[in-house]
Image (tube, rainbow, N blue to C red):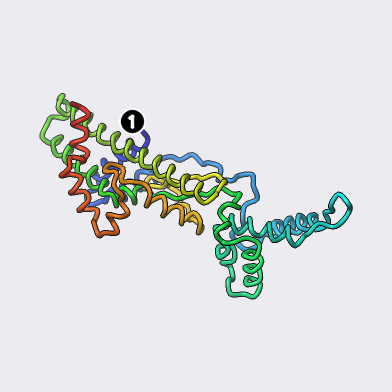
Amino acid sequence: MTKNSARKKAARAYQAAHPGTSFPDALRAVTESATSTPTAPAGAGKRQPSTTGIDPQTKAAAIDALTALARSTRSDGSQVDFADTLADILVVVAANMGSVDGLLRGRPASWEADLIHQLITGAAAEEDLPARRTEPVRVPLDIDEQWDRFGLADLAQEAFDEIDGRMLEVDDESPESGALADEQLAVDELEASDRAAYISAFTASARQIAQEHGITAPIEVITSSYLDNQPAHEPDDLEERIRYAATAATPHPITDSNAIELMEQGVSRTELAAALRAAGHDYRARVARVSS
């Protein structure tokens, strides 16, 4: 049984013990009560940005580095073109921040920001920035949000509720009860397989889109769900653009149709779930086909 399956089963047990609790709230309650192992933050070992303003040590290190660059000389002893070097550095920093606007968001209307904007866009076109990025592009994917939009969360919950109803009609120690528990596990594993396949397809879409934009920096898909006990990743401008494009390019995990187009056409998740159910794509029917 996967960790995801175990927590979802624990959440359903929590719902049974706490009537009226929604499934997401039950998942959060189960997750909060579980013992978690601290992990090192992403990028550990690198200088981290300050959360209270400009860090004096970081600023001093930047001044030292820029001064060393300014004092650099060519092989003939002449001084390097510091202005060109500084402009190139700012282009890369803007690329790492997702956009020029992302770099200047702290005070975008200042005269300093205007001059920096002119310098960067004079050195590189805005559309060329993604290819200059050196930091990983971390594309967020809220898998639970997508599952809800696709109508699959409703189908999975319906399958469990239907099996739970049949469990109430048989003895807990009977072979029928064991068979129903196996059926419930099969539904859970099928849903987990669908989610994993969608994450894989989304990741492939994100990397393809990045490649088309000339991005050579690593592409990381940051998947979040109700089971997480940490804040979701907040994307920068570039990451958000790739997230939206990858969502639009990745087909519905079961129907192979474009789910974004369906949503934009006004198809609700309830209607989509009903269509899936009518077509035999619901989890109960699919488990029955696999088991037969």
Q: Position of residue 291 (x, y in %)?
A: 20, 27
Residue 190 vs 132, above or below: the answer is: above
Q: How many marks?
A: 1
Residue in the picture at 45% in, 40% down: 36
Q: Amino acid at mark 1?
A: Met
Q: Nearer the viewer, residue 240 or 35?
A: 240
Q: Position of residue 79 (x, y in %)?
A: 84, 57
Residue in the picture at 59% in, 49% down: 135
Position of 193 with respect to 175 (left or right) is: right
Residue 13 vs 174, above or below: the answer is: below
Quadrant showing the C terminus: top left
Q: Dot 1 surroundings within 10 Å: few (below 14), some, or many (20 or more)?
A: few
Q: Nearer the viewer, residue 61 or 235?
A: 235
User: Residue 16 appears in which quarter of the rendering?
Assistant: top left
Residue in the picture at 18% in, 48% down: 275
Q: Position of residue 218 (x, y in %)?
A: 55, 44
Position of 262 with respect to 199 (left or right) is: left
Quadrant showing the N terminus: top left
Residue corresponding to mark 1: 1
Residue in the picture at 34% in, 39% down: 7
Q: Position of residue 290 (x, y in %)?
A: 22, 29
User: Residue 8 appears in which quarter of the rendering?
Assistant: top left
